[in-house]
Amino acid sequence: MDIVKEVLEKQQRDLERYKPITVDKHLEVRLDVGSLLCTDPNDLEDSQLKNNREKYLLDLSRDNTQLLINSIWELPTERIDECIVAKLPEPTTVLPRLRKVPGPKPLTKWEKFAKEKGIKKKKKDKKVYDTTLDKWVPTYGFKRADAEKEKEWVLEVPKNVDPNEDMFQKKIDLRSEKVAKNEIQRMKNIVRAKKVEVPRGGYFGPEVASSRQLLTAVTVAKSSTASVGKFQNKLPKEKQARGIGVKELIPGAKRKASHISTQPEKEVNLDLIKSVLNKKPKYDIEKAISIQKNEDKLQRETNPTEKGKKGKKGKGGKGGRKPKGGRGQRAPGKKAAVGRKRR
C-alpha cells in the first residue's frame, strides 16, 4: 500500500509540474499567428485577483501562450539544417506606427543612367590574378594597396617634369584629388535627389544655389580668416555685403567693426599718446572765475565795515596822510645832486 501511495503522489506532482496543453475558455481568444499576438476577451476573476494577484496573472498568461503555441504547431512545417521551422501566415492585426513608412531610396545619376541603358551591376571577385606579380591579389582592402606598392616599386619620370619631383607623392595627390571629386559628385547627387534647401553658408548644388546664397557663402568665407576679412581682395564687380553673414558669424548679435587697420603700429601708438596728452581738462576756467567774483561781491555786501576801512588806506601805508617835508626830501622841480661833496 505504501508503494502504491508513493507512485500516486509522484504522478500527482508530475501533473502539477507539467500542465496539459488543452485550455478551456468561456469565450474563444482571438489569435493572430502572423504577429504572434493573442487577445483574450474574457473578464478577470475579481476574487482570485484580490487573493493572489501574481499567481492568477501568471496562470492566465501561461494559458494564453499555450493556445498561441498550439496554433503554431498546426501550421505546415519544414526541416532546415536540423531544425523544424513553421511558416507564419500574413498578419491580420494592423499595428500603429510611430513614424511614416520609409519610401523607396531615390536613384542616383549613375543608377538612372544604368537603368536606361540596361547596364547591370557585376559582382567583383574578392581576388584577381596579377600577371606582373604572378600571384593572386585582393581586389580591395588594405592588402590591395600593399600589392600596388610591391608592383610599382619604381616610376618613370617624364622629360617635361622636374627630375627632383617626387613621383610617388604626386601619384598620392592625384588619388586624393580624385577621391575629393567623387565626394563632391556624391553630395550633388544627394541635393538633386532630395530637392531641399541646404543650410546657409554650406554646400550648394548648381541647380539650388541663388545669387544671394552665394554672396552669403563668400562673405562668411572671407570673414573667417585671422584678419576677419580685412586684407581679403574683392572679386571683380563684387558688391559690398551689408548685414549678410552676421547670423553665421555672431548669432544673436550685430557685427562690430574690426579693430585691425592698415596703419603701422608705431603710428597708432603715437596717435594714442597725443590724444591722451592733448586732452582738455574737464573743468571750465571762465566759469570758475565768475563764481569767485560772485562770492567776493556777496562778501563785500554782507561786511560793509571792511569796505570802509579799505577805502581810507592810501598808497603810502596805513593812513591817507602825505609825508612831511624835511631832511632827505627834495623840492619838487629840482634834481638831486650826484657826486662827492667838496671840502
Image: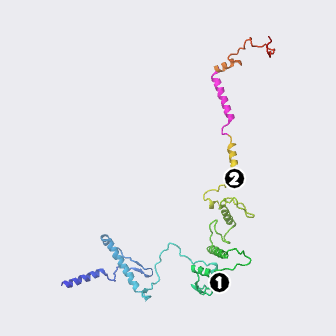
Residue identifier under label 2:
265
Crowd around label 2: few <14 · some 14–19 · many ≥20 (10 Å): few
Of 247 and 271, the residue lying toward us: 271
Residue shown at the point (62%, 67%) measured from the top left: 199
Q: Is residue 45 visible?
A: no
Residue shown at the point (65%, 85%) measured from the top left: 117
The residue segment tinted magenta is: 281-304
Q: Quadrant of residue 7?
A: bottom left
Q: Secondary structure at mark 2?
A: helix
Residue shown at the point (69%, 52%) measured from the top left: 265
Q: Please, what is the three-letter code of the amino acid marked with disc 2?
A: Glu
Q: Position of residue 186 (x, y in %)?
A: 63, 75
Tell whether 328 sits left or right of 43.
right
Of 159 and 282, the residue lying toward us: 159
Of 134 and 19, the residue lying toward us: 134
Tell whether 85 sits left or right of 21.
right
Does 186 appear above or below 277? below
Does 290 appear above or below 239? above
Residue 339 is one of the magenta-drawn residues: no
Residue identifier under label 1:
116
